[in-house]
Image: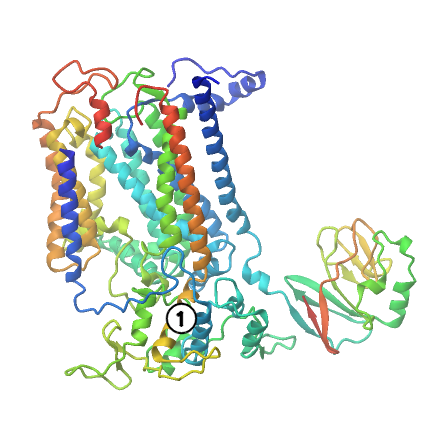
Amino acid sequence: MIKSNLKLFVLSFLLLISLRPLQSAEMVDPIKVDWSFKGLTGTFDRASLQRGFQVYKEVCASCHSMQYLSYRNLGEPGGPEFSEQEVKAIAASFEIEDGPDSQGEMFTRPGKPSDKFKSPYPNVQAATAANGGAYPPDMSVLVKARKGGANYIYSVLVGYEDPPPGVTLDEGVYYNKYMTGNKIKMPNNLMDGLVEYADGTESTVDQMAKDVTTFLAWAAEPELEERHKTGVKVIIYLVLLTILVYLSMKKIWSRIDSEV
Amino acid sequence: MSKEEKKVNRRDFLFTASYTVGAVGVGAVIWPMIDQMNPDKAQQALATTEVDISSIEPGKSITVLWRGKPVFLKRRTSEEIAEARAVKLDDLPDPQKDEDRVKEGKDEWLVMLGVCTHLGCVPLKDKGDFNGWFCPCHGSHYDVSGRIRKGPAPTNMEIPKFEFVDNNTIKIG
Amino acid sequence: MSEHEYVPKSKAAKWFNDRLPLLTLGAHLTDYPTPKNLNYWWTFGGILTFCLITQIVTGIVLAMHYVAHADLAFASVEHIMRDVNYGWLIRYIHSNGASMFFLAVYIHIFRSLFYGSYKSPREVIWIIGLMIYLLMMAAAFMGYVLPWGQMSFWGATVITNLFSAIPLVGDSITTWLWGAYSVDNPTLNRFFSLHYLIPFLILGLVVLHIWALHVPGNNNPVGIDIKKPSKDTVPFHPYITIKDAFALLVFMIIFAGFVFFTPNVLGHSDNYIPANPLVTPAHIVPEWYLLPFYAILRSVPDKLGGVILMFSAIFILFVLPWLDTSKVRSAVFRPIYRQFFWILVIDVLMLGYVGAMPAEGIYLVLARVGTIYYFLHFIVVMPVVGYLEKTDPIPMSISEPVLSGGAEPSLARKVNDKV
């Protein structure tokens, strides 16, 4: 009796779930990329992270801030893992405002690894005004802040197209296949050969989009590698303890005439 | 060994193993809860402070903040240096040569943590019986080299890690 | 309660125990006679205790690093995730822990519904449990506001606006709740304060919940009263403790799976966008555990009506012990009620599902049907079925053959296997 109930239960639930595609028919699903950081033991591709940082620095950073990251993060384990010297050099290449000094004046100095990433604009209002009324979002946690995550970000970067007939776009608005609503105020900034990768990788649009997305995925979840590693250990440990406790339980309950 | 005894042994082993493995897990969970109270990565990274010392006259000192604590930078006169070096090590509760408390060739610059080693107060300058510092909290007297001479403090004031970036700049940390 | 009084062995222990009988309490908890046929659905009490303690411990830790200020809250959460030692782990345990807590509490509640654990003489346990559930929802809602992301802000706005449906004083109450003219920094501050307070209220109620449980003792899958202690019972320790431990470990494996491998799947991506009072996200949805109530709220086209119906959906459970007219506790022996029980389960799941969907078209229809059935179940089905239903024969005890009727001798054990 209960079994047939369960069947009914499962069937109704499946029916419900199958209703789902109806509502999101007009949205194009993002491209599925086989990221190295996917899965239970996924890790970041260091070379890709380093290249991705280069793309961020040379292309994205002119409009997008990453205010929750510090230069020191670039050298931390699980990230791009630049050497200490490289991190210092990267930090020093930015002029950071500091102060007030003993005279009460603000001053600028070369960046230090402990400094946060320098933002292109002093505040949200300035960023909005400089970009035709659309605030270029801070990218520190962008991958976590978008449904579809890394796949979505990558898809938008490579999703620029000419608008289909019948769609008219205002000045400063571009058509993007994957962007929610298909209209985006960010122009297509990537073109083949735009950056010169230090490691000699060919900088195609696809390569740059993948690299910078990898970099953003790390920026949003810098703990990912440690999390995966710890997670595997924790699960193994718990399974082991569960087996031990299960056997102990069987032993204890064998003392009485009842089954567990 | 009879069958019955074997059974008992296996049971004991199981329980011991369960308890042991369980205890290891509890320990592993407690550590993050303790470690989270240690200085975080941002705190650890704020390790260095650079100080411009060009405007300090001989005999004068300034105080700067490093890691939330005061650091005394004193430009000592040659008399003060001579006085510090004339002290016999036997007279010191925490024997240390003045030479070991300064950078070689930059003897006039004393850079030390301005924290009394007794219970953490900030000593007052140019006070006390030894021409150095005096801690008002519990009466510790330090000499012109920042060494403890009298009072409850057990050790000399600490010298932080520092270096001269150039003749006018000191980097602490 | 055990029959004979506990006497400590050592003199010192006796001296202490005479003044504060903690040892007697310990002995009572250890020896507490528990029905030996409890199945795994009965392990969720222990699991819930674990959840509460986990939330309190990780919450206290997070409060050491979190800043309850509209300008700094979002950044302080990122600080926890990036800089604080093991901060990411502690926060993910706390945020996923809320979901695990609700998962366990729903199973616990439906177990009670199936086996009639809310019925006499356990009404007070049931009512205290519902109070805990209400406080859990309040704590979870306020906790979700603290990261000050878009969902935090707009969730807070929508939920606090529910109170504006109250006639005459609604707007004043809402403004009072906010401490401003919209959800703002004062709101965040008081929510943080209350979010810290509520778990301790829950802890107090849990003590009462367990106390009230230890007066009549556990219900069991057969639902009959048993003699304690007897052949039908086992001492709580080690029999129940080890079983609870095993179930808890299985639960922890699932918990760890979420924390380490999909820590954000139960949350909403919009909450990683800092709160912006000028832009509402396209789809506002509460956390999954509140979705059925959200569906009920939206199924009514009238503002006040929706709010009243949503609160009624919870408060009707308080009178459930008196709506159920059946003399038999366990649904195992109630062939008709058992069918309706599963329909209710499906109904609530369906409400949860449509609560996450836009309130239009087929979803709105389903939400209305689901809402109507939900109330019919308690107001009509429970009293009528209880009155009319011909129940199956009930065994006289857990361990002994049935004396009346033609049921199988070892029914109790079979019940175990099936459920």
Q: Is residue B123 above or below residue A98?
A: above
Query: Which residue does the image show at 22% across and 83% down from the upper left?
Result: A162
Q: Is residue C215 above or below residue C160?
A: above
State the residue in front, C97 or C165.
Answer: C97
Task: Give neighbour class at mark 1: few <14, some 14-19, many 20+ (Cα, 10 Å).
Answer: many
- Residue C396: image quadrant is top left
Question: Which secondary structure lies at badge 1?
Answer: loop
Query: Which residue does the image show at 34% across and 19% down from the upper left?
Result: A256
Looking at the image, residue A246 sits to the left or right of residue B88; the answer is left
- Residue C248: image quadrant is top left
Q: Residue B150: where, in percent of width, then height?
A: 84, 52
Looking at the image, residue A25 sits to the left or right of residue B29; the answer is left
Residue C201 visible in image: no
Residue B146 visible in image: yes
Q: Residue A182: where, in percent of width, then height?
A: 23, 75
Residue on which the image places disc 1: A139
| Residue that sits furthest to the bottom in the current view | A171
Q: Residue C208: where, in percent of width, then height?
A: 36, 31
Looking at the image, residue C289 sits to the left or right of residue C93; the answer is left
| Residue that sits furthest to the left in the current view | C388
- Quarter of the image that includes the C terminus of chain B: bottom right
Q: Residue A91: where, in percent of width, then height?
A: 55, 75
- Residue C56: image quadrant is top left
State the residue in front, C50 or C298.
Answer: C50
Callout 1, which amino acid?
A: Met
Q: Is residue C253 above or below residue C408?
A: below
State the residue in front, A12 or C345.
Answer: A12
Chain ID at mark 1: A
Q: Is residue C161 above or below residue B3?
A: below
State the residue in front, A245 or C332.
Answer: A245
